[in-house]
Amino acid sequence: MMYLQPTIFLFNLKDYMLPCLNKKLFGLECPGCGMQRSVHLLFQGDFVGAFKMYPAIYPILILLAFLVSNIFVKYKFADQIKLILMLTTATAILVSYLLKMNNLFN
């Protein structure tokens, strides 16, 4: 007698990743290159690998978590917190991109 096992239909996120248009056209990575792979690594539970792939992933996640929570809970200094989180995220993206480009040309 054949038994059917419950199957969870999991798909591989790597099959659906978009290529970087900047890298295809100009041969240089953009400031967002690595974000999709970093999210994929987060879903796999590789938190250190996700950080190494795209260091700005954690400031982005903190900013998104705050923005979503701010919809439901109104914080007293929400505007100041948003500004600080946005500046932190932008700085992390810029610094990681500059370090990546510096290593590319050395």
Image (cartoon, rainbow, N blue to C red):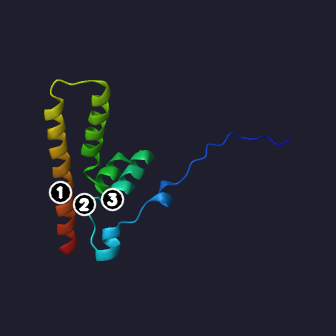
Secondary structure beneath label 1: helix
Q: Amino acid at mark 1?
A: Leu
- Mark pair 3, 1: CA separation: 14 Å
* Other residues around mark 2 within 10 Å, as few (<14) / some (14–19) / many (≥20): some
Quadrant of residue 22 in the image? bottom left
- Mark pair 2, 3: CA separation: 9 Å
**Residue 80 picture location, percent across and down:** 13, 34
Per the image, the residue denoted by label 3 is: 34
Q: Nearer the viewer, residue 99 or 32?
A: 32
Quadrant of residue 70 in the image? top left
The residue sitting at 29% across, 55% down in the picture is 54
Secondary structure beneath label 3: loop
The mark lying in front, picked from 2 and 3, is 2
Q: Is residue 82 left or right of residue 28?
A: left
Q: Which numbered disc, 3 or 1, marks the residue that appears first in the sequence?
A: 3
Q: Amino acid at mark 3?
A: Gly
Q: Is residue 64 left or right of residue 76?
A: right
The residue sitting at 16% across, 23% down in the picture is 76
Q: Which numbered disc, 2 or 1, marks the residue that appears first in the sequence?
A: 2
Q: Is residue 10 above or below residue 100?
A: above
**Residue 66 picture location, percent across and down:** 27, 34
Q: Amino acid at mark 2?
A: Pro
Q: Is residue 96 above or below residue 72?
A: below
Q: Nearer the viewer, residue 45 or 39?
A: 39
Q: Are marks 2 and 3 in contact (CB under 8 Å)?
A: no
Per the image, the residue denoted by label 1 is: 94
